[in-house]
Image: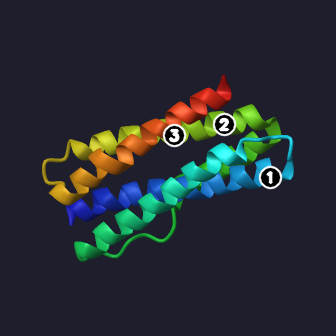
């Protein structure tokens, strides 16, 4: 059961990420002068894929995957709402901070010796490298 809780926490992080990126994409689409949508859409899609992968892992372990991001998602909505008032750079900084938190959470999960090997492999080969790529993209957009 501990493994499911660990994976479900990662799932909630990914659900929050999809919600936050959706809000950012909506904001950037409102202002066509902001070209970030083309860079953010692949990141959003990566997070959606991560959600599907983590949901499948939880189901395979006999658990019921979360369907919403919980408190983290609520916090992300509040922060994103404030960033929307401040503008493009603030939104990108919020997204970058979320990606960094995601890396920390994946690294923490990898420290769990009871983490199933297929989940460990998923994190090491797909999810964590994607997080690092997202950080590089957002860093470039902020420069």
- Which residue is located at x 49 percent, y 54 percent? 46
State the residue position of label 3.
Answer: 134
Secondary structure beneath label 3:
helix
Image quarter in which the N terminus is found: bottom left
State the residue position of label 1.
Answer: 29
| Foreground: disc 1 or disc 2 | 1
Q: Residues within 10 Å of mark 1 (few under 14, many from 20)?
A: some
Image quarter in which the C terminus is found: top right
Instruction: Please provide percent x and percent y for residue 15.
Output: 51, 60
Tell me the distance, in whole angstroms, between the alpha carbons under discs 3 and 1.
20 Å
- The residue most toward the left is 113
- The residue most toward the top is 143
Secondary structure beneath label 2:
helix
Q: Is residue 52 visible?
A: yes
Up-down: is 106 above or below 52?
A: above
The residue lying toward the viewer, choosing from 126 and 108, is 126
Q: Is residue 71 visible?
A: no
Instruction: Please provide percent x and percent y for residue 126.
Output: 35, 50
Do the CB atoms of the residues marked 3 and 2 lie less than 8 Å apart? Answer: no
Up-down: is 100 above or below 44?
A: above
- Which residue is located at x 70 percent, y 49 percent? 24
Q: Residues within 10 Å of mark 3 (few under 14, many from 20)?
A: many
- For marks 3 and 2, the one nearer the N-term is 2
- Which residue is located at x 30 percent, y 75 percent? 59
Instruction: Please provide percent x and percent y for residue 142.
Output: 66, 27
- Which residue is located at x 40 percent, y 39 percent? 103
State the residue position of label 2.
Answer: 92
């Amino acid at each position: 059961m501990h493994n499911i809780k660990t994976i479900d926490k990662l799932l909630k992080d990914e659900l929050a990420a999809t919600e936050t990126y959706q809000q950012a994409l909506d904001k950037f689409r409102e202002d066509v002068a902001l070209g970030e949508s083309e860079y953010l859409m692949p990141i959003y899609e990566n997070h959606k894929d991560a959600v599907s992968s983590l949901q499948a892992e939880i189901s395979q372990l006999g658990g019921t995957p979360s369907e919403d991001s919980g408190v983290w998602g609520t916090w992300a909505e509040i922060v994103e709402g404030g960033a929307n008032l401040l503008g493009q750079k603030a939104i990108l900084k919020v997204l970058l901070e979320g990606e960094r938190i995601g890396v920390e959470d994946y690294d923490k999960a990898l420290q769990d010796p009871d983490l199933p090997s297929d989940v460990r492999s998923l994190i090491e080969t797909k999810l964590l490298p994607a997080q690092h790529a997202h950080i590089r993209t957002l860093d470039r957009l902020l420069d």
